[in-house]
Amino acid sequence: MSVTAPAGFVAGGVACGIKESGDPDLALVATADGTAVAAAGVFTANLMTAAPVQVSRAHLAATGGRAAAVVLNSGNANAATGAPGRADSERTCAAVAAELGCAEDEVLVGSTGLIGIPLPVEPLVAGIPDVVAVLSGDAEGGAAAAEALRTTDTRRKEAVARAGAATVGGMAKGAAMLAPSMATMLAVLTTDAEAEPEVLHRVLAAGVAGSFDNLLTDGCTSTNDTVVLLASGRAGPVDEDALVAAVTSVCTSLAEQMADDAEGATKVVRLTVAGAVSDAEARTGAERIARSLLCKCSWYGRDPYWGRLASELGSAGIGFDQERVAVAYGGVTVAAGGVTIDHDAAAVAAHMDGRYLEITCDLGLGPGTATVLTNDLTHAYLDENMGTS
């Protein structure tokens, strides 16, 4: 189960005709009784902001952080669509509100798909009664909603965690345009914990910082990135730290699932930069490597070419002394003091043959450390992204 695991929520997904394939493309997560509850959202840092992001931000501001539902479509991003796009997102919210009996600004909206193409709003609005009709509080309802979010995702992404007496559930989509700038994809989380909107926002911000903000697959920040958290309050109040831990756990699982499903990827790389002057400098260095096409290609080629990692760190604008650098693949140190050292080459080769790589670069300068999730660069990624079809 995912978004329907916490008490007080229903979900569903249907095909409304946005995708030419006929696959599910309309999802809805709502409170079981249509009543608005505490809500929080974290959105893209991209200034090229999609219409649904603009509308959801405005609705959360208007309600003081309350929502009764989140409606999402896949197959069209409704981005770079101007005032008509915003009107389409508002119309979608209004259609959901009319079905659920809530206020229009108590509905949040998300879209994912191709950018710069007008949203086919007529089939979307026509599909709202259909998705409301299939809303369910069981596992199938959550799974159907998660399935309807998919674009280039090869599988749905769901997660659940506990926070004392409360439950946190989540679903997400994301396989590309993933960079650590606030949210990095579409995700809806629910909890039956009781929390005021300002607390919920703190909890969500902490959860995102400890998970999605560590994900960098291709270095591209989407126009539509949205993470929403709704709290029904059915389980009563819980310790805020426990709620942060559960939300972070769900977000981390979803982020790892996205890294594992990244477009064309054959490697999932957990890259740590340690020994930096500060955590911030470690983060800068880790992101520099994760964005490097040369490093990504070496991972695809299963080549433990540590010099590329060191070169990126040396040009990252952070504290660096080449005679202190050490690099390890899968726990096997291949370089120390800035030079190659004797090591178990067979163990390193076996590690590079696997799908999941653990790489650590130690700068030897201080206590700073940071870890990012990233991927290799493959021919399949190019094939997927050479056009808009």
Image (cartoon, rainbow, N blue to C red):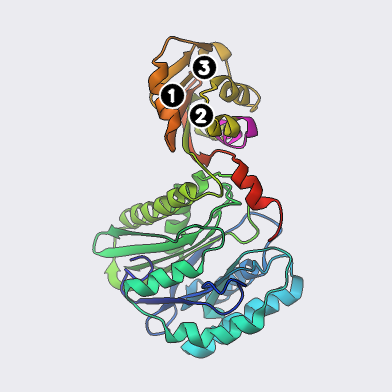
Segment colored magenta: 284-294
Cα separation, mark 2 vs mark 1, equals 7 Å
Whether 349 is drawn above or below 119: the answer is: above
Q: Is residue 219 visible?
A: no
Q: Nearer the viewer, residue 38 or 173?
A: 173
Report the disc number at residue 325: 3
Q: Amino acid at mark 2?
A: Arg
Question: Quarter of the image containing the N terminus?
Answer: bottom left
Q: Position of residue 17 (x, y in %)?
A: 59, 78
Would you name the residue on which mark 1 appears?
349
Front residue of 64 and 346: 346
Q: Position of residue 256 (x, y in %)?
A: 43, 48
Which badge, 3 or 1, comes first in the chain's sequence? 3
Q: Residues within 10 Å of mark 2 (few under 14, many from 20)?
A: many
Tell me the amino acid under the disc marked 3: Val
Tell me if residue 236 is in the magenta stretch: no
**Whole-percent x, y for residue 12 in the image:** 43, 76
Q: CA distance from mark 3 to mark 2?
A: 22 Å
| 353 sits to left or right of 91 | left
- Label 3 residue SS: loop
Find disc 2 in the rendering and name its residue: 302
